[in-house]
Image: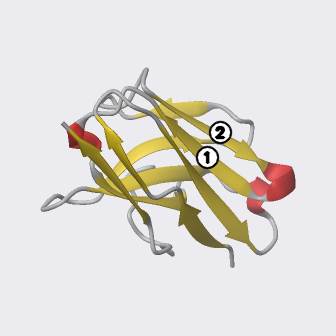
């Protein structure tokens, strides 16, 4: 089973940028569609962005054009480049495999997440 460790804790002002990383342990990382998710204060966890094994990507409407997801299969790493950050992006960010072909499936194994705080 693949497990994940997120990193890239950051405090940034609105309009700034951060890059999050997710390190996968175990084998077969390159066989999984991967997603970034987040949970803001007082909010439900939500899907942010996803990348398939062929490196095609999808984004939620609220980050499209600002965030970029990428992966490095040779290093078992997943990344999220976040630009033009807004206070509403403040959340704990998680990486996870996609389950059942559905980005909105919140089941499966979660890491500890990494905190992103955007000040206004």
Q: Is residue 32 above or below residue 19?
A: below
* Residue 15 visible in rendering: yes
50 lies left or right of 90: right
- In the depicted structure, whether residue 27 falls above or below residue 49: below
Most extreme residue toward the bottom is 1
Task: Return the residue found at the far right.
Answer: 74
Which sits earlier in the primary sequence, circle 1 or circle 2? 2
Number of other residues with Cα within 10 Å of mark 2, as a class: few under 14, some 14 to 19, many 20 or more: many
Q: Element type at marker 1?
A: strand
**Residue identified by numbered label 1:** 79
Compare residues 118 and 109 and report the one nearer the observer. 118
The numbered mark at residue 70 is: 2
Q: Is residue 88 above or below residue 6?
A: above
Q: How many marks?
A: 2
Using residue 82 as the reference point, say whether residue 63 is left or right of it: left
- Measured as percent of width and height from the top left, residue 94 is found at 45, 61
Tell me where residue 81 sits by quadrant.
Answer: top right
- Whether residue 99 is visible here, answered yes or no, is no
- Residue 88, position as x, y percentages in the image: 21, 41
Instruction: Indicate the position of residue 5 as horizontal and vertical percent values.
Output: 59, 70
The local secondary structure at tag 2 comes to: strand
Q: Residues within 10 Å of mark 1 (few under 14, many from 20)?
A: many
Please name whichever residue, 4 or 21, is drawn nearer the observer in this view of the structure.
21
Task: Look at the image and tell me in which quarter the C terminus lies.
Answer: top left
Mark 1–mark 2 Cα distance, whole angstroms, equals 5 Å
């Amino acid at each position: 089973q693949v497990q994940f460790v997120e990193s890239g804790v950051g405090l940034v002002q609105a309009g700034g940028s951060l890059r999050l990383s997710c390190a996968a342990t175990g084998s077969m990382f390159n066989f999984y569609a991967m997603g970034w998710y987040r949970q803001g204060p007082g909010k439900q966890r939500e899907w942010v962005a996803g990348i398939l094994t062929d490196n095609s990507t999808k984004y939620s409407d609220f980050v499209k054009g600002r965030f970029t997801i990428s992966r490095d299969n040779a290093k078992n790493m997943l990344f999220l480049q976040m630009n033009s950050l807004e206070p509403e992006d403040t959340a704990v960010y998680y990486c996870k495999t996609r389950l059942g072909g559905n980005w909105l499936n919140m089941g499966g194994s979660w890491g500890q997440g990494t905190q992103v705080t955007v000040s206004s």
